[in-house]
Image: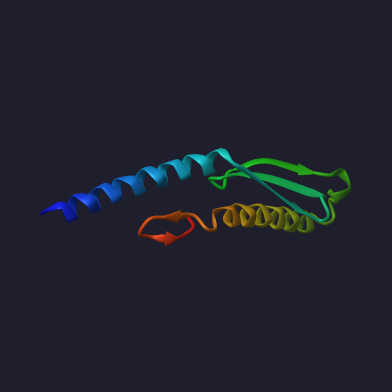
Amino acid sequence: MGTGFSKKKKEAKLMQEQFGKMQQKMQAQEFTGTAGNGLVTLTISGEHEIKKISIKKECVDPEDIQGLEDLIKVAFNDATGKLNKSMEGTNFPGLGSFGL
């Protein structure tokens, strides 16, 4: 196994280091989603972990729990969409663009 193998091995190590740096950067970022014109706001980490949920008083109706649940889901999906969009265009040599 000559220099071609060594070159590929170095490229693989470089990709692994770049991937690790990208993961750390994503973990440190937070993404906020909203629903119902700001009635529900939800913040997630780059690891899809919910960090904060904010629900305005006027949104809480004991007779409509399902409506509140739906707003929380929409806010989470909005935040997740922003996280995924931020990952678009991530590029590594030899692999092209991909998202996690």
Taking depth in this image into account, of 43 and 26 the one nearest to the observer is 26
- As drawn, the residue found furthest toward the left would be 1
Taking depth in this image into account, of 5 and 28 the one nearest to the observer is 5
Taking depth in this image into account, of 39 and 96 the one nearest to the observer is 96
In which quarter of the view is residue 17 placed? top left
Residue at left 47%, top 45%? 22
Residue at left 38%, top 55%? 93
Instruction: Using residue 60 as the reference point, say whether residue 34 is left or right of it.
Output: left
Residue at left 41%, top 42%? 20
Residue 23 higher or lower than 99, as above or below: above
- As drawn, the residue found furthest toward the right would be 58
Rendering coords of residue 91 (x, y %): 45, 55
Instruction: Using residue 9 as the reference point, say whether residue 55 is left or right of it.
Output: right
- As drawn, the residue found furthest toward the front would be 3
Q: How is the image coloured?
A: rainbow
Residue 78 higher or lower than 18, as above or below: below
Rendering coords of residue 71 (x, y %): 75, 56
Rendering coords of residue 29 (x, y %): 59, 41
Instruction: Using residue 8 as the reference point, say whether residue 41 is left or right of it.
Output: right
Instruction: Using residue 43 as the reference point, say whether residue 71 is left or right of it.
Output: right
Rendering coords of residue 48 (x, y %): 56, 48
Taking depth in this image into account, of 100 and 4 the one nearest to the observer is 4
What is the quadrant of the N terminus in the image?
bottom left
**Could you tell me how many numbered marks the image carries?**
0
